[in-house]
């Protein structure tokens, strides 16, 4: 499998970038070529709910059952304390804190151009977004027109990868932080993520917590997964297309 540059970007928009914030390195969006015109030509940016990505049965690529969750599974088990007697015991299971994953929407990109990632995502093209700050500014402007997005707020950052054996401290209660975290199983994706939420889904402590045994199996949900398309207009000036061969 190789990479071939198929089309060139137009001149950069440095003046726009200055008004949009600090310049970012190029980002990469992997997708099947049948969606190329919708994304580049029409500027249709599809945000899917976190619940979609955690539903590995419906995904055609490697889904993440811990998407939108902060998990803690120490090697020796969880230390539990009986609040009545004060007695401590070890429990072999996993602590999970889950955000309102049907109410938080994400758009995923990568910081790397890689044939291996293209193969993993079953994509025959990769769109290089040469001016990410401009794209982010366009998306932020579109969100401000939608009253159901609280204050039109857009989160964007590199995904931070963690090991489930690492203690979560206060992170388990902060949805904003959890949205930008994945387990180290996905480090190779080098993901950069954009996210927004409906209502108060990003409010501190708006999570569901569970302690589950190692034998518990979470079946993928068959419920519909919400999505939202932002229509920005042509993105041709921001993009280069790499064909995967």
Image: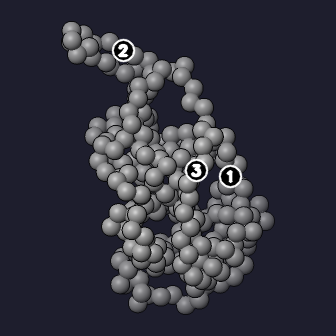
In terms of sequence position, does the residue under pointer 3 or pointer 1 come before the other? Answer: 1
Q: Please name the residue that numbered disc 2 is placed on.
A: 90
- Residue 17 makes an appearance in the image: yes
Identified at 69% across, 82% down, the residue is 7
Q: Please name the residue that numbered disc 3 is placed on.
A: 225
| Residue 175 locus on image (x, y percent) | 36, 48
Q: Give the secondary structure at mark 2.
A: strand
Identified at 39% across, 37% down, the residue is 208
Q: Please name the residue that numbered disc 1 is placed on.
A: 120
Q: Residues within 10 Å of mark 1 (few under 14, many from 20)?
A: some
| Residue 97 locus on image (x, y percent) | 39, 37
Question: Which tag is nearer the camera, tag 3 or tag 1?
Answer: 3
Distance in Å between CA atoms under marks 3 and 2: 37 Å
Q: Residues within 10 Å of mark 3 (few under 14, many from 20)?
A: some
Q: Give the secondary structure at mark 3.
A: loop
**Image position of 176 (left or right of 50):** left
Task: Locate the N terminus by quadrant.
Answer: bottom right
Q: Are marks 2 and 1 in contact (CB under 8 Å)?
A: no
Task: Locate the C terminus by quadrant.
Answer: bottom right
In terms of sequence position, does the residue under pointer 2 or pointer 1 come before the other? Answer: 2
């Amino acid at each position: 499998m190789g990479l071939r540059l198929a089309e060139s970007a137009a001149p950069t928009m440095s003046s726009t970038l200055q008004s949009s914030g600090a310049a970012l390195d190029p980002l990469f969006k992997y997708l099947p070529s049948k969606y190329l015109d919708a994304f580049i030509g029409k500027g249709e940016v599809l945000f899917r709910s976190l619940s979609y990505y955690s539903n590995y049965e419906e995904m055609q690529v490697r889904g993440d059952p811990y998407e939108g969750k902060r998990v803690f599974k120490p090697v020796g088990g969880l230390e539990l304390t009986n609040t009545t007697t004060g007695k401590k015991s070890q429990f072999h299971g996993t602590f999970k804190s889950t955000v309102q994953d049907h109410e938080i929407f994400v758009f995923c990109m990568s910081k790397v151009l890689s044939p291996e990632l293209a193969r993993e995502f079953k994509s025959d093209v990769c769109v290089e977004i040469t001016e990410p700050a401009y794209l982010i500014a366009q998306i932020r402007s579109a969100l401000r027109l939608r009253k159901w997005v609280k204050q039109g707020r857009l989160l964007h950052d590199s995904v931070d990868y963690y090991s489930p054996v690492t203690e979560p401290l206060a992170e388990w209660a902060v949805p904003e932080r959890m949205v930008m975290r994945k387990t180290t199983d996905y480090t190779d994706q080098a993901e950069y993520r954009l996210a927004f939420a409906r209502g108060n889904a990003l409010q501190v402590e708006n999570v569901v917590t569970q302690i589950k045994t190692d034998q518990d199996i979470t079946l993928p949900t068959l419920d519909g997964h919400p999505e939202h398309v932002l229509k920005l207009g042509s993105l041709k000036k921001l993009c280069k297309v790499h064909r995967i061969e």
